[in-house]
Image: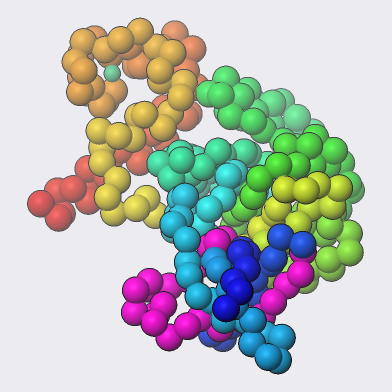
């Protein structure tokens, strides 16, 4: 039987929507035997399907995954656009650092997107300081407003190739950005509770859409979250390797230096000299102690 290759663009209730190379979407069910060999099918999976007489399809094979992102749950992505809001809900830089670390461990290129920049008011220098810290660390930072349609051209250019997944707290404006990028889509947009200052989990399912004027640019909208944890297999020793700016510091005396209590630490010297952002370093210590506490617990 003839098989076709495609990509899982969404899935719920036991059905998966598969996009074929020509753009056609086919509603599919997985073959029973797949459930035994693979625990789950994820959005982003590359699959082979066969057609049933009624026009629906059957997922026959799931191809090897390039990478796996635990949260939001998606596979085979090239970039993660970490979306924060300037206000409502207020940005959380510890959450940002957590996501930057998780993305790098999964070998996914992170991009940082500050949305609701129209709410910046007279805090421009505060924003500039944050932007500088992350830019100097080597990350791309975008400032946009989905509602005012500002900064969207730069963002669009950064998303034109490969698959980008948007991730961030509920209410930061991921679906609003999607609607700017794909004006025909009309994704449901929620409001932010006045009392709690956070979103209401409007988006329920992850789905991948093709960007206009692009052959191979895809964007995924995902449900928001409140908290995110470092994966359980994260070690204290590897954490620093996901802080690119630490690599610019002079070498430490000890090769196993965690840049915390050790003497002759190049990273601490660079922080003291103002070459590495003090706040980023403090948040690094927070994550380090979190991992260390966990390691003690499970030992
Ligand atoms: N002021 C302002 N409000 C915005 C902007 N972008 C989005 N919003 C508002 O923020 C609220 C939440 O937007 P959504 O797009 O639903 O947020 P989301 O990230 O998709 O939320 P979840 O689906 O719950 O994860 C809506 O009321 C939007 O109108 C912006 O640039 N500026
Ligand atoms: Mg949404
Ligand atoms: Zn050190």
- In this view of the protein, which residue sits in the foreground, 254 or 77? 77
Q: Which of the 4 image quadrants contains residue 4? A: bottom right
- In this view of the protein, which residue sits in the foreground, 153 or 259? 153
Q: Is residue 124 magenta?
A: no
In magenta, the rendered stretch is 23-46
Q: Is residue 38 magenta?
A: yes
Place of residue 54 in the rendered image (x, y in percent of width and height, measured from the top left): 70, 91
The way the protein has been coloured in the rendering is rainbow
Place of residue 15 in the rendered image (x, y in percent of width and height, measured from the top left): 58, 83
Which quarter of the image is occupied by the N terminus?
A: bottom right
Q: Which of the 4 image quadrants contains residue 53? A: bottom right
Residue 67 shows up from this direction: yes
- In this view of the protein, which residue sits in the foreground, 32 or 254? 32
- Relative to 179, say whether 56 is above or below: below
Q: Which of the 4 image quadrants contains residue 160? A: top right
- Relative to 65, say whether 289 is above or below: above
Q: Is residue 261 left or right of residue 192?
A: left
- In this view of the protein, which residue sits in the foreground, 71 or 34? 34
Q: Name the residue: 26% across, 12% down.
A: 252
Residue 11 shows up from this direction: no
Q: Name the residue: 64% across, 81% down.
A: 51
Place of residue 237 in the rendered image (x, y in percent of width and height, measured from the top left): 25, 33
């Amino acid at each position: 039987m003839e098989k076709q290759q495609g990509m899982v663009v969404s899935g719920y209730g036991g059905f998966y929507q598969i996009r074929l190379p020509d753009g056609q979407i086919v509603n599919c069910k997985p073959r029973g035997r797949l459930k035994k060999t693979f625990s789950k099918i994820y959005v982003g999976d590359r699959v082979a399907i066969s057609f049933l007489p009624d026009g629906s399809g059957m997922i026959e094979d799931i191809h090897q995954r390039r990478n796996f992102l635990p949260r939001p749950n998606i596979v085979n992505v090239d970039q993660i656009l970490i979306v924060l809001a300037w206000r409502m809900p207020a940005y959380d830089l510890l959450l940002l650092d957590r996501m930057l670390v998780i993305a790098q461990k999964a070998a996914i290129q992170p991009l940082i997107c500050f949305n609701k920049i129209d709410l910046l008011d007279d805090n421009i220098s505060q924003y500039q300081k944050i932007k500088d810290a992350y830019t100097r660390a080597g990350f791309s930072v975008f400032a946009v407003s989905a509602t005012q349609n500002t900064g969207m051209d730069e963002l669009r250019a950064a998303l034109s190739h490969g698959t980008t997944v948007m991730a961030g707290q509920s209410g930061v404006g991921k679906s609003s950005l999607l609607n700017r990028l794909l004006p025909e889509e009309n994704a449901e947009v929620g409001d932010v509770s006045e009392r709690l200052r956070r979103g209401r989990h409007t988006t329920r399912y992850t789905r991948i859409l093709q960007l206009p004027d692009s052959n191979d640019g895809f964007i995924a909208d995902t449900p928001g979250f409140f908290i995110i944890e470092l994966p359980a297999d994260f070690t204290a020793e590897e954490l620093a390797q996901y802080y690119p700016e630490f690599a610019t510091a002079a070498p430490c005396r000890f090769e196993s230096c965690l840049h915390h209590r050790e003497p002759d630490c190049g990273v601490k010297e660079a922080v003291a000299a103002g070459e590495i952002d003090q706040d980023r370093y403090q948040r690094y210590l927070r994550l380090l102690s979190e991992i260390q506490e966990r390691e003690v617990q499970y030992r």
